[in-house]
Image (tube, helix red, strand yellow):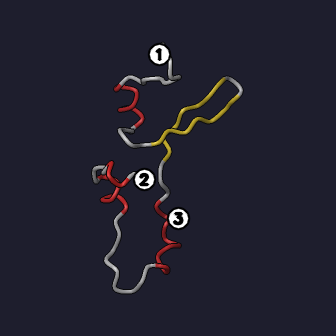
């Protein structure tokens, strides 16, 4: 498969490749250097590592669901 590099050094991957990787808009990809080039992998959140923050949430605070949070649309007004 051949992809083109734009003048801004960007590459567009075909939709079927991203679908096969299980990634979509807003997801992060990781480039891992290897002897034959780079390996492209989706970067996943390890939800088990977030448990260490649980003791820092004040009592009575509503539960926080990161999956629901990530599905919310991005509000450009929040950008500083």
Position of residue 12 in the picture relative to residue 35 (left or right): left
**What residue is drawn where x is 48% and y is 13%?**
2
**For residue 34, side relative to residue 66 (left or right):** right
Kindly state the secondary structure of the residue where label 1 is placed: loop
Q: Is residue 56 above or below residue 8?
A: below
Q: Quadrant of residue 25?
A: top left
| Classed neighbour count for the residue bearing mark 2: other residues with Cα under 10 Å, few (<14), some (14–19), many (≥20) | few
Closer to us: 26 or 45: 26
The answer for how far apart the CA atoms under marks 3 and 2 are is 29 Å
Secondary structure under badge 2?
loop
Please report whichever mark, 3 or 1, sits nearer to the chain's N-terminal start.
Answer: 1
- The residue positioned 42% from the left and 43% from the top of the image is 27
Q: Earlier in the sequence, mark 3 or mark 2?
A: 3
The residue under label 3 is: 49
Residue 3: assigned label: 1
Which SS class for mark 3?
A: helix
The residue that disc 2 covers is 80
> How far, Cα to Cα, is label 3 from label 1?
36 Å
- Are the residues tagged 3 and 1 within 8 Å (C-beta)? no
- Of all residues, the one furthest to the right in this rendering is 35
Q: Residue at x 40, y 27 (%)?
A: 17
Residue 80's x, y, as percent? 42, 53
Image height of 26 relative to 58, above or below: above
Report how far apart the C-alphas of labels 2 and 1 lie in the structure.
Answer: 34 Å
Name the side, left or right, on which 52 lies relative to 69: right
Q: Residues within 10 Å of mark 3 (few under 14, many from 20)?
A: few
């Amino acid at each position: 498969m051949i992809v083109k590099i734009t003048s801004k050094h960007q590459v567009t991957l075909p939709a079927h490749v991203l679908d096969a990787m299980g990634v979509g808009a807003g997801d992060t990809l990781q480039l891992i250097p290897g002897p034959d080039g780079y390996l492209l992998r989706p970067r996943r959140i390890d939800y088990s590592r977030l448990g260490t923050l649980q003791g820092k949430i004040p009592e009575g605070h509503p539960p926080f669901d990161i999956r629901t949070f990530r599905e919310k649309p991005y509000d450009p007004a929040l950008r500083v």
